[in-house]
Structures are given as structure tokens and as C-alpha cells.
Amino acid sequence: MMPKAKPTGLRSPWVDVPYEPTLYHFLGPFDVYDREETLGVELDTWDMNDASQRAALIRRDITSQYKELSYRHRHALVAVLAQALQDPDYDFQAILEHDPESTYALPARWDDMADPRAFFTDIYHLAQQDWHDDLARAAAEDPADW
């Protein structure tokens, strides 16, 4: 089951609806649907089983790129990831599975990643490092006031 953020008054940065982050939000920069010949080809050159390549890609496409997210949005997104990581039985592989009926697609072979939990653990640790100030600022606030 996909963890969801606890309800707050936080609104989506894209449309005027409540912000309810999921782990799929971390994968948005890697969506190659209708971009298989460009982004898909480029992402296929990365070895997601190599920790240093994974970290470089996470920093390039997630932690340095989510500028549209406020410190509160980043905190809510990381909280969902922390919740999933706390569950030793959480199926991170299911998030990477290709759905042929979807208009969303990850790069080829990502659904064969050796350790999907390590990928999401890396995202968590790098977000904690790179967004440290934003996460601390949001943690000092009461989400009920958002």
C-alpha cells in the first residue's frame, strides 16, 4: 500500500488542490513516456545498481531540481518516503513495475533494479542532506497551520 501524507492545509504547487505526495512524485523526472528516444536513451546509460551513479542522478534530477516545491512541500514529500522506509515489508519494486496501460513510463530495465529499496533509501539520505535547512524549517512548524 502506498503511504500518503498526513492531511494538512498544504496546497499543490501545480493546481489548487490539497497536496498529497506519494513516492511516485520522486520518479517524475524519470518519466520517459513519449520521450523514450531522448530522455529514455540518456537514462539508459546510467547504471541504477551502481550507488555512485544512482546518487549523481538523484542529485541531478531530484534534489537540485524540485525548485517549485516549497520547504513545506519538500518536508511532506520526504515524510511519505520516511514512512515507507520504516516498513520493512514495503514493496518498492512495485513502484518501478512497468504498466503498459499507463501514460507513465520509467526507463528500460528500471523494473529490474537489483535493490529498489536502496534507490529510495538513497533518495531519502540525499534529500536529508541537500534539503536540510528546508526540512528543519518545516519540522519546526505545526503542519496544521499550513
Image (tube, grey):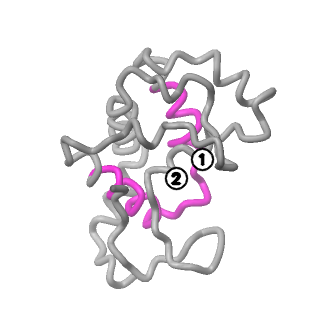
Answer few, some or many: residues within 10 Å of disc 1's Cα (few below 14, many 20 plus, some between 14 and 19): some
Amino acid carrying label 1: it is: Gly
Which residue is found at the position 62% from the left and 25% from the top? 108
Tell me residue 38's x, y (percent).
79, 28
Question: Which residue appears at 59% of the width and 37% of the height?
Answer: 61
The prevailing secondary structure element of the residues shown in magenta is: helix
- Residue at horizontal 37%, vertical 56%? 2
Residue 119 appears in which quarter of the rendering?
Answer: top left
- Residue 144 screen position, x and y as percent: 32, 83
Q: Is residue 138 above or below residue 115?
A: below
Which contiguous range is marked in magenta? 55-82
Asked which secondary structure carries label 1, the reply is helix
Residue at mark 2: 25
Give the image quarter of residue 34: top right
- Looking at the rendered structure, the number of numbered marks drawn on it comes to 2
Residue 8 higher or lower than 62, as above or below: below
For the residues bearing labels 1 and 2, Cβ distance under 8 angstroms? yes
Amino acid residing under circle 2: His
Splitting the image into 4 quarters, where does residue 37 fall?
A: top right
The answer to which of 130 and 99 lies nearer the viewer is: 99
User: Neighbour class for label 2 at 10 Å: few (<14), some, many (≥20)?
Assistant: few
Residue at the (33%, 33%) spot, across then down: 117
Work out how far the residue at label 1 is from the one at label 2, CA to CA, in angstroms.
Answer: 5 Å
For the C terminus, the image quarter is: bottom left
Can you say whether 82 is above or below 118 in the image?
below
Instruction: Name the residue tied to disc 1.
Output: 28
| Residue 80, x across and y down, in percent | 35, 57
Element at label 2: helix
Q: Is residue 61 in the magenta section?
A: yes
